[in-house]
Amino acid sequence: MKDSLGAAQSLLVLGGSSDIAMATARKMAALRTKRIYLAGRTSRQLEDNAAELRQLGATVEVVPFDAAATDDHEKVLSQVFGAGDVDVVLMAFGVLGDQAEDEKDPVRAAAVAHVNYTGAVSSGIVVAQALKKQGHGALVVLSSVAAERARKANFIYGSSKAGLDAFAQGLGDSLVGTGVHVMVVRPGFVDTKMTKGMEKAPLSTTPEAVADAILAGLRRGSHTVWAPGAFRYVMSGLRHVPRPIFRKLPM
């Protein structure tokens, strides 16, 4: 449960190695979030993130979790919720893939979709049921501006995020009145280890800036957050560009 000042006391991160998730967890730890679960595939990065958050005063538990292993989601996540209520769940896992290579290999292409969409549907349903049962909590879903309109340069990733985005919006609508809030976050290009070496796109941002947007959105009770906020207007325009013109844009 939130404390007397309205601060979340517990956080579950699905994708505990994510730079955006870690930036958010740091800020939440500074705001009196004292119990944090970092769920992800076993790695040195995950353990290092846990150690850093412990130094900030949080009690941190590392939870083995693989977004692609959908058969295990209910068991793993039920154990987390069985240990006590969770105030905020941040769904931050995802893979970018390599469009040029993925187009040549349907197995690789399907793997991107499986993690970004199927893994999110599976874990999202489990989390939603658990939050609904406890009667309160927020699910924050990291989508992308790429979900708004798939581009020829990244239609595999973009379509997987579009599916995730639609799922999260519908899930949120289905939970109205239950005490559970779902918030979709749509960042643009974020300077993280996943995008290292890539040319930065216009309106590029940082994990820390996205984290600030997430926390501001939670305070406002927002259903959709753009990061940076200017993307709300940029994508509104691009959404209505005629398709013959859109496919010719250098993007």
Image: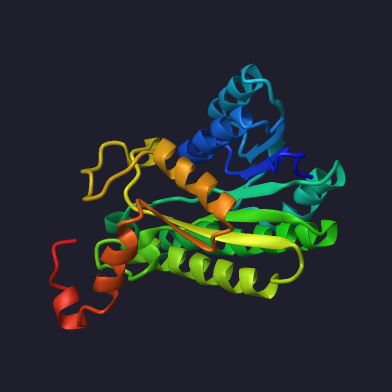
Q: Quadrant of the C terminus?
A: bottom left
Please determine whether, in this image, residue 171 is positioned above or below residue 10: below
| Residue 105 in sight in this render | no
Left or right relative to 100: residue 175 = right
Please determine whether, in this image, residue 211 is positioned above or below residue 112: above
Residue farthest toward the front in the current orientation of the protein: 5
Q: x, y percentage for residue 203? A: 25, 49
Q: x, y percentage for residue 36? A: 69, 34
Q: How is the image coloured?
A: rainbow
Q: x, y percentage for residue 43? A: 57, 30
Looking at the image, which is closer to me, 163 or 217? 217
Q: x, y percentage for residue 216? A: 51, 47
Question: Residue drawn 58% across and 30% down?
Answer: 46
Question: Residue drawn 33% across and 39% down?
Answer: 191
Left or right relative to 244: residue 174 = right
Residue farthest toward the top in the current orientation of the protein: 55
Left or right relative to 74: residue 140 = left
Q: Quadrant of the N terminus?
A: top right
Please determine whether, in this image, residue 48 is positioned above or below residue 204: above
Looking at the image, which is closer to me, 159 or 72? 159
| Residue 75 in sight in this render | yes
Question: Residue drawn 50% across and 66% down?
Answer: 165
